[in-house]
Amino acid sequence: MRRRAVVLGAVAGVLSGLAAGARAARPPDPDPEPFLLLRHVQTGEVLSSRFERRGRLDPDEARRLEWFMRDWREGRSMPVDPDLLQFLARLRHAAVLEGHEGEILLHSGFRTRKTNEMLRRAGKGAAANSLHLRAKAADISMPGLRPSRLARAARRTGLGGVGLYSGFVHVDTGHPRHWTG
């Protein structure tokens, strides 16, 4: 009887070790909850949004996010790429798993051509055909998380472009690539 208990205990230990190893090796949840907690650096606005319902983009939340991520200088907006919202949600999810609050600070979302040209002339590194012009990019940071760590997390997702700048990270839904600005 004692031998049986030892064998069963050993088997249970191996199985639990394998299960723990499988959990450790598994990448983060590929479909984190579609939730964002955002604070706009320029306007001070705060937005909490569960942007999907039953796997579909919630139109009311999409409109709220569109306005939140507007070109604040021009007061104009454009529908935000749903893939960008998913990208941001994955970054928030990864930060929460590491013990951070998960609040995303938005430095820049959609930009009009006029704003983009003004930033280019000012030497702010805005690309002539920036994905900000199509609401497919955001410049972000997260309290308590260095931009370099946020950029690494963004690159690990493989979801799009990632640019590391002083004080923020650019993320977009273009093809995966990365740079330092």
Image: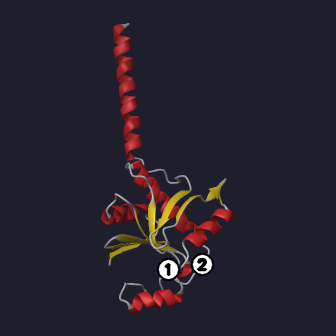
Q: Which residue bears the numbered disc 1?
A: 131
Q: Amino acid at mark 2?
A: Ser
Viewer-closest of 2 and 137: 137
Q: Which residue bears the numbered disc 2?
A: 77
Q: Amino acid at mark 1?
A: Leu
Viewer-closest of 44 and 152: 44
In x, y percent, where is residue 89?
50, 59
Seen in the image, is 143 located left or right of residue 82?
A: left
User: For residue 50, what is the image quadrant?
Assistant: bottom right
For the point 42% across and 87% down, which residue is it? 119
In x, y percent, where is residue 157?
43, 61
Secondary structure at badge 2 equals: loop
Q: How many marks?
A: 2
Secondary structure at badge 1 equals: helix
User: For residue 51, what is the image quadrant?
Assistant: bottom right
In x, y percent, where is residue 136?
53, 75
